[in-house]
Image (cartoon, rainbow, N blue to C red):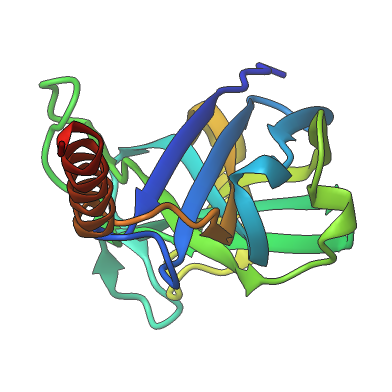
């Protein structure tokens, strides 16, 4: 398992005076796996000195990556069940499953993805007449919709803990429908079809959005009017004192 975590802070504040205008601060963290396992991710709580918290949104994203290589020995033709020769069509498939646990949050997600189908013709990696290659790709998806949670666990000092567990990391090929399971297994056993999967990874990203009403700050025009009024009052009092 490759454990990596990072945090990104994004602050959005409406322009103009802060009275009645909402702001949002976003904390983002990622965890990466190369095999099944668990790790923790910590994201900051909302600082109540910034203003009044109005909503919390947690979003979960999953990205699965796997390189696929299929090599077919096409020296002799493949025969379908009706006795016709054909070249196999193979489709890469990725199935990653993970769960995320946190305050008020229990999310189980399945990242199920199928890549582009390839007919096993042409020399892609090795320029020899007898070998044919295809299907390299990866999948990516938003795996959980946004949700809102209790304020207490996400407010104050310190961090909010999340436990991320990668429970399944599988890669495979969807075989040609003209090929039976027994034929496919026999071809793999004999070496006529060679399937390879390299560089597996699963990256889970968590976003926590805090929307809040910031503390009231006087607008520049209000400050200017107040300053002008005080200055006028000062000169009026001064003239009275200097009058004979």
| Residue 103 in view (yes/no) | no
Which residue is nearer to you in this view: 230 or 139?
230
Which residue is nearer to you in this view: 231 or 94?
231
The answer to whether residue 80 is left or right of residue 29 is: left
Which residue is nearer to you in this view: 25 or 109?
25
- Direction bottom: furthest residue: 82
In percent of width and height, residue 223 lies at 27, 50
Q: Is residue 170 above or below residue 31?
A: below
In percent of width and height, residue 193 lies at 45, 40
The answer to whether residue 182 is left or right of residue 117 is: right
Q: Quadrant of the N terminus?
A: top right
- Direction front: furthest residue: 244
In percent of width and height, residue 81 lies at 45, 78
Q: Is residue 188 above or below residue 178?
A: above
**Image quadrant of residue 3?**
top right
Q: Quadrant of the C terminus?
A: top left
In percent of width and height, residue 177 lies at 45, 75
Q: How many labels, in total?
A: 0
Q: Is residue 123 above or below residue 54?
A: above
Q: At x 43% / y 52%, what residue is drawn?
A: 217
Q: At x 69% / y 34%, what residue is drawn?
A: 43
Q: At x 81% / y 61%, what residue is drawn?
A: 151
The answer to whether residue 187 is left or right of residue 168 is: left
**Image quadrant of residue 16?**
bottom left
**Image quadrant of residue 70?**
top left
| Residue 12 in view (yes/no) | yes
Q: Is residue 141 above or below residue 199?
A: below
Q: At x 86% / y 61%, what residue is drawn?
A: 106
């Amino acid at each position: 398992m490759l454990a990596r975590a990072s945090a990104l802070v994004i602050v959005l504040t409406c322009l103009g005076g802060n009275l009645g205008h909402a702001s949002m601060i976003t904390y983002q963290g990622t965890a990466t796996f190369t095999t099944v396992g668990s790790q923790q991710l910590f994201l900051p709580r909302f600082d109540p000195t910034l203003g009044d918290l109005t909503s919390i949104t947690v979003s979960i994203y999953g990205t699965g990556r796997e390189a696929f290589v299929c090599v077919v020995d096409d020296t002799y033709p493949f025969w379908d069940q009706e006795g016709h020769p054909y070249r196999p069509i193979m489709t890469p498939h990725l199935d990653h499953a993970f769960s995320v646990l946190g305050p008020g949050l229990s999310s189980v997600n399945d990242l199920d993805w199928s890549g582009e189908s390839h007919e096993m013709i042409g020399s892609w990696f090795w320029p020899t007449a007898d070998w044919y290659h295809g299907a390299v790709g990866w999948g990516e998806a938003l795996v959980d919709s946004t949700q809102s949670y209790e304020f207490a666990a996400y407010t104050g000092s310190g961090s909010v803990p999340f436990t991320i567990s990668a429970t399944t990391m599988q890669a495979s090929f969807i075989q040609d429908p003209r090929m039976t399971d027994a034929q496919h297994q026999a071809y793999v056993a004999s070496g006529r079809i060679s399937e390879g999967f390299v560089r597996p990874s699963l990256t889970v990203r968590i976003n926590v959005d805090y929307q809040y009403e910031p503390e009231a700050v006087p607008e520049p025009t209000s400050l200017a009017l107040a300053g002008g009024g005080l200055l006028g009052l000062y000169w009026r009092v001064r003239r009275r004192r200097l009058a004979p």
